[in-house]
């Protein structure tokens, strides 16, 4: 039986409480959109629900066996610390490649079919792109959804990205307009994972410092920043994921992910 629920925002105080309530009721398109993560990679093709249309371009949420490269990428995480998904435009690198895997590690909610690396505890992670602007407009929106400003002027993320909205906690904002600096994500253990956003334009220095478990580089990084990210994940036995379309040709970073030419020398001998 369908029941229409009408709630005035004033009755529940603010948007965050309203959304929390709708999440509990499973009652709105927004509440559904905040659960995008759980609808991706279904067993079988699923007609695109109306609520998903603002985020997804196609008429179908395709079954996961139709994404063999994505599955191969996830599975390779079991074996390799450094992985690259170098592919053409609009194939789902950000949303259902790096973004999906990052969401799984942050929440600890791996789908039953997950073939890849698993972290048992909350993680610290970075999501990175070329400029503050692209990180905010592409990566942040894909992971967290667009921003919402409450009547009292407080900014929130909608939680309609690939990270489940009901897992999103406290946000610290950066100096760059509307760009998240750090956000806390509820892990299945009840503790908090931590996600920071960074851009390559801030230079290698911004990537020095503390260890990370997972780093997502969603555009081709300069080699020095890539090297720094590999170091940041060394002590945690963490992972670095690159998802990009190669626009600058055969760079040093691209070369790392290409099959090496056969020299004819047997290195084991
Ligand atoms: N698993 C999926 N199921 C259904 N649709 C998807 C899936 N993954 C991606 N899409 C659709 O493809 C679009 C492009 O996805 P995404 O932005 O992740 O691609 P991309 O390869 O990162 O693109 P770009 O080349 O612009 O960086 C999404 O907006 C969404 O509509
Ligand atoms: Mg992308």
Image (spheres, rainbow, N blue to C red):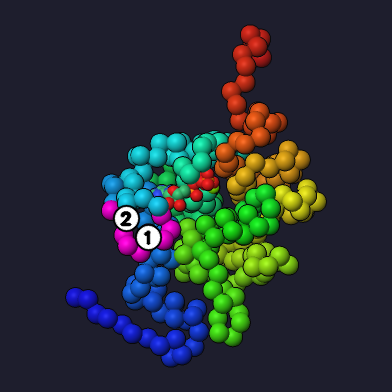
Do residues under tags 2 and 1 come within 8 Å of each other at their CB atoms? yes
Q: Residue at 67% across / 49% down in the picture?
A: 130
Q: Residue at 19% across / 75% down in the picture?
A: 1
Q: CA distance from mark 2 to mark 1?
A: 7 Å
List x then y, in percent, for residue 93: 51, 44
Q: Is residue 41 visible?
A: yes
List x then y, in percent, for residue 267: 66, 14
Pointer 1 residue: 52
Pointer 2 residue: 48
Q: Quadrant of the C terminus?
A: top right
Looking at this view, is 112 or 141 the one in front? 141
Q: Is 228 inside the magenta-drawn segment? A: no
Q: Residue at 52% across / 36% down in the picture?
A: 87
**Residue 228's image quarter?**
top right
The magenta segment: 47-56
**SS type, badge 2:** loop
Whether residue 260 sits left or right of residue 224 in the image: it is left
**SS type, badge 1:** helix
Residue placed furthest toward the bottom: 11
Q: Is 50 inside the magenta-drawn segment? A: yes
List x then y, in percent, for residue 260: 62, 21
Type of secondary structure dominating the magenta stretch: loop
Residue placed furthest toward the right: 205
Q: Is residue 182 visible?
A: no
Confirm if mark 2 falls within 8 A of ligand 1.
yes
Residue 216, above or below 245: below
Whether residue 214 sits left or right of residue 92 in the image: it is right
């Amino acid at each position: 039986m369908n029941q229409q629920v009408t709630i005035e925002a004033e009755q529940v105080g603010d948007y965050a409480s309203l959304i929390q309530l709708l999440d509990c009721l499973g009652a709105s398109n927004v509440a559904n959109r905040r659960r995008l993560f759980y609808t991706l990679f279904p067993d079988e093709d699923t007609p695109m629900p109306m609520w998903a249309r603002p985020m997804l371009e196609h008429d179908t949420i395709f079954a996961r066996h139709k994404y063999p490269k994505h599955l191969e990428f996830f599975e390779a995480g079991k074996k390799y610390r450094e992985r690259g998904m170098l592919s053409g435009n609009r194939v789902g690198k950000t949303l259902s490649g790096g973004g999906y895997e990052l969401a799984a590690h942050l929440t600890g909610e791996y789908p039953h079919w997950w073939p890849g690396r698993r972290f048992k505890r909350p993680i610290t992670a970075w999501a990175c792109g070329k400029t503050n602007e692209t990180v905010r407009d592409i990566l942040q929106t894909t992971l967290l959804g667009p921003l919402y400003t409450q009547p009292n002027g407080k900014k929130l993320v909608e939680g309609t990205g690939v990270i489940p909205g009901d897992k999103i906690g406290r946000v610290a904002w950066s100096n760059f307009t509307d760009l998240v600096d750090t956000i806390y994500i509820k892990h299945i253990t009840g503790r908090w994972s931590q996600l920071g956003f960074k851009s390559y334009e801030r230079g290698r220095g911004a990537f020095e410092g503390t260890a990370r478990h997972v780093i997502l580089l969603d555009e081709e990084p300069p080699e020095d920043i890539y090297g720094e990210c590999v170091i940041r994940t060394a002590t945690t036995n963490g992972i670095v994921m690159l998802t990009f379309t190669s626009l600058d040709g055969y760079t040093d970073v691209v070369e790392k992910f290409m099959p090496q030419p056969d020299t004819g020398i047997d290195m084991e001998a």
